[in-house]
Amino acid sequence: MKRWIFIGSVLSFACNANPSAPAPAPTTTAQATSVVTASAQPAITYDAADLPVPADFEDEAEKTITAANYKDELEKIESELGGPDTSRPVPR
């Protein structure tokens, strides 16, 4: 409700502004402005062969993960990555 009141008051103010009124003259005092340029950092590039992909781990996972130990292996992987994904429930 407050949002609509705010939007209505802003629109009312904007519609009631006098567009034919001249804009105020800029002040003649000189202001020093400093321009700071950021030094360009070189872009980090990676070779596609160096990036790990799921296919790199499939053979190892097929050999080491079984129906009996998948929960323990999942916990190991989650701890290596920084914890479980809390956005979805994991059945236990």
Image (cartoon, helix red, strand yellow):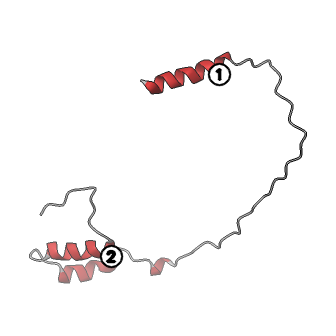
Residue at the spot 28% in from the left edge and 62% down from the top edge: 85
Residue type at numbered disc 2: Ala
Which numbered marker is on residue 57?
Answer: none
Residue type at numbered disc 1: Ala
Which numbered marker is on residue 55?
Answer: 2
Label total for image: 2
Q: Pick the quarter of the image with the C terminus.
A: bottom left
For label 1, the SS is helix
x, y (%) of residue 69? 12, 77
Mark 1: few/some/many CA within 10 Å (<14, 14-19, 20+): few
Q: Is residue 58 left or right of residue 25?
A: left
Residue at the spot 65% in from the left edge and 22% down from the top edge: 14
Q: Is residue 23 left or right of residue 15?
A: right
Vertical order, 16 against 57 (above or below): above
For label 2, the SS is helix
Which numbered marker is on residue 14?
Answer: 1
Disc nearer the start of the sequence (1/2): 1
Question: How far apart, in angstroms, are the residues tagged by discs 1 and 2?
Answer: 59 Å
Residue at the spot 74% in from the left edge and 63% down from the top edge: 37
x, y (%) of residue 38? 70, 65
Q: Quadrant of residue 56?
A: bottom left
Task: Tell us which disc is closer to us: 1 or 2.
Answer: 1
x, y (%) of residue 26? 86, 35
